[in-house]
Image (cartoon, coloured by chain):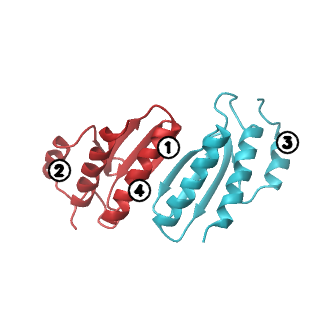
Chain colours: A cyan, B red
Amino acid sequence: MSVLTESERAAALEGLDGWTFDAARNGLARRLTFGDFGEAFAFMTRVALAAEKADHHPDWSNVWNRVDILLTTHDAGGVTARDVALARAIDAIAPSLP
Amino acid sequence: MSVLTESERAAALEGLDGWTFDAARNGLARRLTFGDFGEAFAFMTRVALAAEKADHHPDWSNVWNRVDILLTTHDAGGVTARDVALARAIDAIAPSLP
């Protein structure tokens, strides 16, 4: 699994919803805000299942209704197709929440 | 809900398992490491339920098998009895995991 080139990464970001490239952390970043903690954690639970299925896991944090996600492939040292695929899966989960 | 004095906080830490005071973030901190992501997220799910029950929520992050928790009472601007109570609840959950 190789790190995407800058243009590959830019093309991938075009197709995603609300993600940016975090250069300092070398990953794809998205912040999501929910109505409350319960909604935020319900979302996290669905992402956890998608991550486990993909065998690729987010670096993420949560403060009450806010979830910050960073996707990077530690073994490869940057953003790979696996991160883009997980970002796409997360985008599919996000709007389906109440 | 008032912020604990330094000596009250120190006394509370004595009764907790693996927590330290993070002065920079003004909260009680604990890092837990599990066998894999599934175990880490199972733990997080139980903590989420305890937090919701207490109506007091952690600032936390997860990277694969690692969970970093910070407990602080944002409204009070520091560590209060609510943080100590949640830390105790988390300690009760942690060793019960497989």
Residue, disc 1: B62
Amino acid type, callout 3? Glu
Residue, disc 3: A8
Q: Residue B92: x percent and y percent? A: 27, 46
Q: Are marks 3 and 4 in contact (CB under 8 Å)?
A: no
Q: Chain of mark 1?
A: B
Q: Chain of mark 3?
A: A
User: Dot 1: few (<14), some (14–19), or many (≥20) neighbours within 10 Å?
Assistant: many
Which is in the foreground here, disc 3 or disc 4?
A: 4
Which of B63 and A89 lies nearest the eye of the viewer?
A: A89
Q: Marks 3 and 2, how far apart in space? A: 53 Å
Same chain under badges 2 and 4? The reply is yes
Residue, disc 2: B6
Q: Marks 1 and 2, how far apart in space? A: 29 Å
Instruction: Please give the name of the residue rendered at 46% of the width and 37% of the height, measured from the top-left corner.
Output: B66
Which of B83 and A45 lies nearest the eye of the viewer?
A: A45
Amino acid type, callout 4? Ala
Amino acid type, callout 2? Glu
Residue, disc 4: B48
